[in-house]
């Protein structure tokens, strides 16, 4: 049986890193959606906005 010692400081560091990465990803997604909204308002086509932002057509339809 393998016994390892639980280290709260290491666990806390991992949780913080995971939370940071999750927050960063959510922020980037919101940024792409905002760019998409602005581009659609300016008359860009759905295909152009998909190419620019990387968002799929269903997402664009939902935010439009």
Image (cartoon, helix red, strand yellow):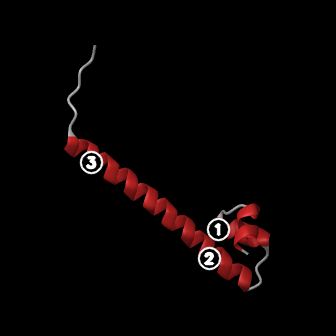
Q: Which residue is drawn at 73% across and 68% down?
A: 62
Q: Is residue 6 above or below residue 2?
A: below
What is the secondary structure assignment of the residue under circle 1?
A: helix
Q: Nearer the viewer, mark 2 or mark 3?
A: 3
Tell me: 64 left or right of 32. Answer: right
Tell me: 44 left or right of 27. Answer: right
What is the secondary structure assignment of the residue under circle 3?
A: helix
What is the secondary structure assignment of the residue under circle 2?
A: helix
Quadrant the N terminus occupies: top left
Q: Which mark is residue 42?
A: none
Q: Which residue is drawn at 23% across and 21% down?
A: 3
Q: Mark 2 points at which residue?
A: 35
Q: Mark 1 points at which residue?
A: 53
Mark 1–mark 3 distance (CA, rounded to whole Å): 34 Å
Quadrant the C terminus occupies: bottom right
Q: Nearer the viewer, mark 1 or mark 3?
A: 3
Mark 2–mark 3 distance (CA, rounded to whole Å): 34 Å
Q: In which quarter of the image is residue 30?
A: bottom right
For label 3, count other residues whose C-alpha is less than 10 Å away and answer few (under 14), some (14-19) or many (20+). few
Q: In this view, does 52 lie above or below 19?
A: below
Q: Say if mark 1 contacts mark 2, CB within 8 Å.
A: yes
For label 2, count other residues whose C-alpha is less than 10 Å away and answer few (under 14), some (14-19) or many (20+). some
The spot of residue 14 in percent (x, y) is 31, 46
Q: Quadrant of residue 56?
A: bottom right
Mark 1–mark 2 distance (CA, rounded to whole Å): 7 Å
Q: Which residue lies furthest to the bottom in this view?
A: 42
Q: Quadrant of residue 49?
A: bottom right
The spot of residue 45 in percent (x, y) is 79, 75
Q: Say if mark 1 contacts mark 3, CB within 8 Å.
A: no
Q: In this view, does 6 lie above or below 39?
A: above
Q: Which mark is residue 12?
A: 3
């Amino acid at each position: 049986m393998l016994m390892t010692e639980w280290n709260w400081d290491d666990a806390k560091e991992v949780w913080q890193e995971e939370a940071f990465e999750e927050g960063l990803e959510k922020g980037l997604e919101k940024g792409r959606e905002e760019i998409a909204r602005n581009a659609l308002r300016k008359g860009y086509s759905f295909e152009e906005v998909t190419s620019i932002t990387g968002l799929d057509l269903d997402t664009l339809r939902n935010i439009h």
